[in-house]
Image (cartoon, grey):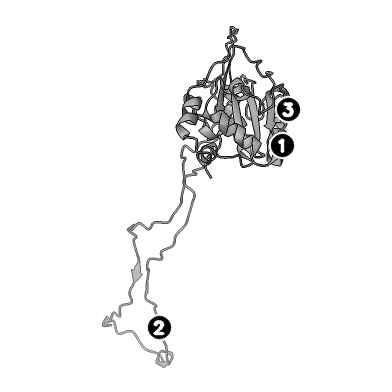
Amino acid sequence: MTEETIVAMYDTPAHAEAAMRDLKTANVPPNAISSHAQGGTAGGTTAAPAREPGFWSSLFGGESADSAVYDRSVASGSTVVTVKVPEQHKSQVVEILERYDPIDFDDRAASYGTTQTTTTTMAAAPVTVAVAAAPLPKAAMTATGDDTIKVMEERLTVSKRAVNNGGARVRSYVVETPVEEQVSLHSETVRIERHPVTNGAPVTAADFTERVVEMTETHEEAVVGKTARVVEEISLRKEASDRVEKVRDTVRSTKVDVEQVPAVEATTTTTTAATKLAAAPPMPAAPANPKR
């Protein structure tokens, strides 16, 4: 496991103390954090005073123009905070250090007349220290990740729902159909018949009285009537049946392979918060100290 040293400078001790407090809250071990200010060091590490020759080279793997920048910054009252963390936790540490307005290293170097090339070259080529650094505890830096893998599986659940398959509808309505029937009709007509009498029958006085004879003519006419009767009944009913259907689908689950990882000798590399983490180009991360 590769370990890196992240460096940030603050003009005020209060900002440095706040940054270290947040680092400890994020489960960074106290012995991985140290601060270097005028008069000595603070924190969990044991280091020589900041002004002692060779102190910065012990952090950065050799003397360079950057050491002079740190020396002059500390002499002017700045505080340098260093954090040793595994590479996978570097971006979180940088984010915490940036919260409290660290000094832009390039601007500070330019103000001291130190070229930026020296700083960039040093940060872009981290030096491996012969002594392997103690790795962080496994429980450290849990604020941004979880070292637990959840094993999951899906289970098939089958429910039922009614589906409309159509149906039948019965509607009654009235239609009129022309029909005809033949019927025999009877009629009676009165006719007046006259017959001459030639037999000489005598007439009496009673025959000379008034008399009226009437006969009524009649005829039949068709009278139409209608009768209704039920000729058929139509009704709807349902026939229910049950069937067994086999449902097929796929379910997902996660499998976990557990293997032992062999131990790898740890190395320590150093970079500064102001060099935008150029020391580890394969792992993208937020800039450690953008120019303001």
Q: Going by the image, does 182 lie left or right of 244?
A: left
Disc 1 designates what residue? Answer: 17
Disc 2 is placed on an element classified as loop
Q: Which x, y percent locates residue 191?
A: 30, 78
Label pair 1/3, CB-CB below 8 angstroms: no
Closer to the camera in the image, 214 or 144: 144
Kind of residue sitting beneath label 2: Val
Q: Which x, y percent locates residue 6?
A: 60, 28
Disc 2 designates what residue? Answer: 213
Who's the residue at 27% across and 80% down the image?
A: 195
Closer to the camera in the image, 128 or 58: 58
Q: In the figure, 163 relative to 174: above or below?
A: above
Please tell me the numbered disc located at residue 43. Answer: 3
Disc 3 is placed on an element classified as strand
Disc 1 is placed on an element classified as helix
Q: Which x, y percent locates residue 207?
A: 40, 89
